[in-house]
Image (spheres, rainbow, N blue to C red):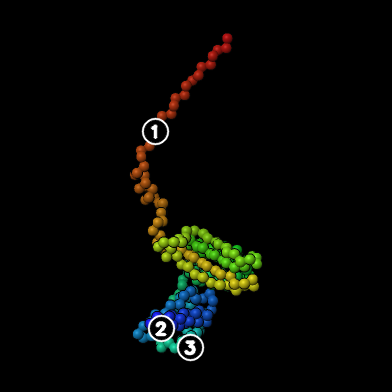
Amino acid sequence: MEEKKFVTFKKEELGVKEYIKRELGKGKISSVSIEYTPVGEKIIVATSKPGLVIGRRGEKIDELTRVLKKMFKLDNPHIEIKEILDPSLDAQLVADEIALLLERKGSLQFKVIAYKTLEMIMKSGALGAEIVLSGKLPSERARSWRFAQGYLKKTGDPAKVVDRAMAQAITLPGVTGIKVSILPPNAHIHDKIVIDDALRKRLALYEPASEKKEEPKKTKTRRKKSE
């Protein structure tokens, strides 16, 4: 019984998150997290456009709070806005932006969209990024296209610091899957080697003394006088 209650509770929580993302609009919300306090439910919405999410004088927030109380039977929901300062380093916002561009401009320009997005991510200071597009992009047969640049961990503990997200774009040929992975600038990489002046000085201490090799003397050959 406890397992069924837990599954039902998580399904309701997922329904609240999906409803908030759908109502506030695609490409505006990065993540929605719920914290349960004695006072009520604290819903934290991470977004790069807090003004559009809040609305004029908080109209959207008030309306969303009323719907959450009525539809999902929440006791006292309190919505808190967390602003994302650099949306180019947020994987979910980047994935949603690619999906919107594919839906707006068409799937034929997927390479231009992917390369421009990758360039924007790296200019923001990311250590590495990867974009994977899957679907019927240039032809009728579905396949995957990978665009990557920089340093990106795939396995092990360092891979946990990589920000990953997925999105879907509904185009004329069909549904296109989008996967975005970003290694943020402040990520701590354990096996990263930085070659600087301090490391060069340390390496110079272990170098053996260079011995000058004597060059072989050139022997002069006398030409024989022709008789």
In this view, the residue in front, 125 or 78, is 78
Sequence-first disc among 2 and 1: 2
Which amino acid type is marked by label 3? Met
In this view, the residue in front, 48 or 175, is 175
Residue at (50%, 19%) from the top-left corner?
Answer: 221
- Above or below, 130 relative to 7: above
Which amino acid type is marked by label 2? Lys
Residue at (46%, 75%) from the top-left corner?
Answer: 31
Q: Mark 2 — residue? A: 5
| Number of marks | 3
Residue at (57%, 9%) from the top-left corner?
Answer: 227
Q: Is residue 182 visible?
A: yes
Find residue 195 and report its horizontal and vertical position in percent: 41, 51
Residue count near mark 3 (Cα–Cα under 10 Å), binned few <14, some 14–19, many ≥20: few
- Above or below, 144 relative to 49: above
Q: Is residue 101 left or right of residue 39?
A: right
Q: Mark 3 — residue? A: 71
Sequence-first disc among 3 and 2: 2
Q: Mark 1 — residue? A: 212
> Cα distance, mark 3 to mark 1?
85 Å
Circle 3 or circle 1, nearest the eye = 3
Residue count near mark 1 (Cα–Cα under 10 Å), binned few <14, some 14–19, many ≥20: few
> Cα distance, mark 2 to mark 1?
80 Å
Q: Is residue 137 visible?
A: no
Residue at the far top in the pictured view: 227
Find residue 182 and report its horizontal and vertical position in percent: 48, 65
